[in-house]
Structure formats: C-alpha cells, structure tokens
Amino acid sequence: MTDRRHETLRIAVDVALLGIGRDALQVLLISRGNPPFRDRPALPGGFLRQGERPDHAAIRELSEETGVDGGRLHLEQLGAYGEPDRDPRGRVVSVAFFGVSPAVPPTAGSDAMAAAWRPVDEVRGRLEYTTLATLFCGQTFTLDDLRRVYEAVWGQRLDPGAFAREVARSEGFEQSAALLAAGDAGLLRRPILRMALAE
C-alpha cells in the first residue's frame, strides 16, 4: 500500500538526440561536470526553471550543454521517468525528449565538462562489457529496470531468467535484496552477451 502523503519532487528534462556522422548512427552525450555522477556520460538535460515548460527546458539545456540549437529541431516527448531512488539529490521526475539532428560539432558548456557524438553501436557494444547500462537507471534499481535498458538499447526481448543469472554472475553489480547498484568496477569480468539472452 502506498503512503497517502503527497510527494515533493523536482522536474528535469533529458534529450536523446540522434544524428548521422562518419556513416554511422550516433547519439549526443555529455560528460557531467557536477556531482552526483561527475565525469560520467549522460544525455544532455537538467532541471526546469520556475514557470518554464518542459519542451522549452529541453531546448535550453541542449543549447547550454552542447551548443546545439534545439529550437531549430523537431523534438518529441518520449515519456516521463520517476523511480523513487533514481537520483541521490531527492525525488526527481525526468521528462525525456527524442530528436534528430545533423551531427554538427557540439560545444560543451554550462555544467557539462565535454560533449561529443558517440556511435550508437559503440554504446550497444559497451553494454556487454561495462556497467554503462546503469547510467540509464537511478542510483539503485531493480533487475527488471536494468533488463529494460538492455532490451531498449539492443532492440530485442531478453529472457528474464537468463538475464537474472548473468547479472548474478557478473561482479560489476552490487545486489541487496531486490535492488541493484553499480559496483566500483567499470568493466565486467564476465560479459553479458546479447545473443545468449535472446528469447
């Protein structure tokens, strides 16, 4: 049963911007300049300001953190994500936007240390050997949350039982009851291979 008290929360936006560069589909990522998760890759985004619409915040954050003019792009709202423990700063609900752009060279600014286009296939491949998938989750997350990240990036359904066994064997994750967290290791000693988990 849920608590009947009203939640106090903050609203953020994130932008998944795709482009074609070097004959490959790429996604625009930043390196976070502030805690939490300083130096970690992330989608461009940030908190709404007083009286600001989510779509306007997405355009502003994209411009501030990457120099890309989101006002000239078509951005679509994908959904809202608000797992209770996804952000150590408090309860945050993030409104995600999707867009397509020419892969123009970005310029890092605001609270981003760096901004760069990364091949989508590179991101997909890194899921097998690193803990990159945890960046799409909160500070703690469930096994189902993590499996949905792998399914979304790889574009295929995974067998839940096989996925659970692979994660349990991988030393890159810390498990406590039903929740997981990224461990200290950046690389997985035992990779989580896409083909072994397909339904």
Image (tube, helix red, strand yellow):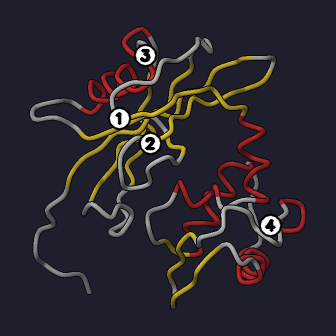
As shown in the figure, which amino acid type bears the numbered disc 4? Ile
Q: Closer to us: mark 2 or mark 4?
A: 2
Q: Earlier in the sequence, mark 4 or mark 3?
A: 3
Q: Dot 1 corresponds to which residue? A: 111
Residue at 59% x, 70% y is: 184
Please name the residue that numbered disc 3 is placed on. 67
Label 1 vs label 4, nearer the camera: 1
For badge 3, the amino acid type reads Gly
| Image quadrant containing the C terminus | bottom right
Q: Where is residue 73 in the image (x, y as percent from the top left)?
A: 46, 13
Q: Do the residues labelled 2 and 1 touch (CB within 8 Å)?
A: yes
The image shows residue 98 at horizontal and vertical percentages of: 50, 31
Q: Which residue shows up at 13% across the image and 78% down it?
A: 4
Amino acid at the residue labelled 1: Asp
Circle 2 Cα neighbour tier, 10 Å, few/some/many (<14 / 14–19 / ≥20): many
Q: What residue type is labelled 2?
A: Arg
Disc 3 and disc 2 in contact, CB within 8 angstroms: no
- Asked if residue 199 can be seen in this view, the reply is no
Q: CB of mark 2 within 8 Å of CB of mark 4?
A: no
Q: Earlier in the sequence, mark 2 or mark 4?
A: 2
Residue shown at 44% from the left, 63% from the top:
138
Quadrant (top left/top right/bottom left/bottom right) for the N terminus: bottom left
- Identify the element where label 4 is drawn: loop
Coordinates of residue 50 in the picture (x, y in percent): 10, 35
On the picture, is 194 further left or further right than 145?
A: right
Q: In this view, does 98 lie above or below 167?
A: above
Q: Earlier in the sequence, mark 3 or mark 2?
A: 2
* Distance between mark 1 and mark 3 Cα atoms: 12 Å
In what element is the residue under mark 3?
loop
Q: Is residue 23 left or right of residue 34?
A: right
Q: What residue is drawn where x is 30% and y is 53%?
A: 93
